[in-house]
Amino acid sequence: NFLLTQPLSMSESPGKTVTISCTRSSGSIASTYVQWYQQRPGSSPIILIYEDRHRPSGVPDRFSGSVDSFSNSATLTISGLKTEDEATYYCHSYGVNHQVFGGGTKLTVL
Amino acid sequence: EVKLVESGGGLEQPGGSLRLACVSSGFTFADHAMTWVRQAPGKGLEWVSGISASGGSTYYADSLKGRVTISRDNSQNILFLQLRSLRADDTALYYCAKWSTATTLLGYMDVWGKGTMVTVS
């Protein structure tokens, strides 16, 4: 089984851009799709990015995803930060018959 | 509107059992895989179990294998999770989530319920 490692916390100012990384411990990051979920305080998670880079309808294009085989990492980029983006972000991928979540990155926007 | 409503949580003693349920509406339940994810207070998301659309394939986290059983009733649009031999570290908010596909081997969790709280003490 592999692990997905994310930074514990990040902070940035409104209007700026932030990138959150998700590094796979073993096996290629490109071998299975990566998803990103947003969880605001007191709320259930919602899907932000699926299959590495695709946005479900309703998700603003300020959110984008990418995968880098060289660093074996996936990245969530949020541009034009808004205070409403303050949340915890989780990456997710598939193992063999199981699912793996990253530990989550708490983003503070101030 | 797609809706998932979990129930069955509560306060249980160590060693006890609970059966969680997730009632689904607003989509063709029998066409989608489903999953349970839990979140301990102040902690991250932990995948618990998944089941294919037909119910023919089930998957469990290694940390819980042998103590949990996932099942579904496609005629009633209900997902279940049986938890046994409960321990204090099972204390968590248990979410049910709908998968975008018929199998959890692909796709993603596109709709989540609000969760049901299980406290073991």
Image: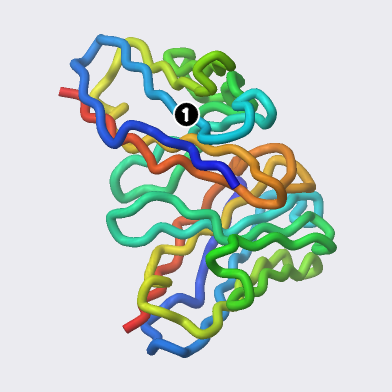
Question: In the image, what residue occupies the spot 50% across and 32% down?
Answer: A36
Residue farthest along the front direction in this orientation:
A26
Q: Nearer the viewer, residue B100 or B39?
A: B39
Q: Quadrant of residue A84?
A: top left
Residue picked out by circle 1: A23
Q: How many marks?
A: 1
| Mark 1 residue crowding within 10 angstroms, few (<14) / some (14–19) / many (20+) | many
Q: Nearer the viewer, residue A22 or A11?
A: A22
In percent of width and height, residue A65 lies at 52, 18
In percent of width and height, residue B3 lies at 58, 53
Q: Quadrant of residue A21?
A: top left
Question: In the image, what residue occupies the spot 52% across and 56% down?
Answer: B37
Q: Nearer the viewer, residue A100 or B19?
A: A100
Secondary structure at badge 1 equals strand
The answer to whether A87 appears left or right of B36 in the picture is left
In percent of width and height, residue B89 lies at 38, 71
In percent of width and height, residue B6 lies at 52, 66
User: Which quadrant does the C terminus of chain A fall into?
Assistant: top left
The amino acid sitting under disc 1 is Thr
Q: Nearer the viewer, residue B42 or A58?
A: B42
Residue A108 lies, with reference to residue B94, above or below; the image says above
Question: In the image, what residue occupies the spot 60% across and 43% down?
Answer: B109
Residue B54 lies, with reference to residue B10, above or below; the image says above
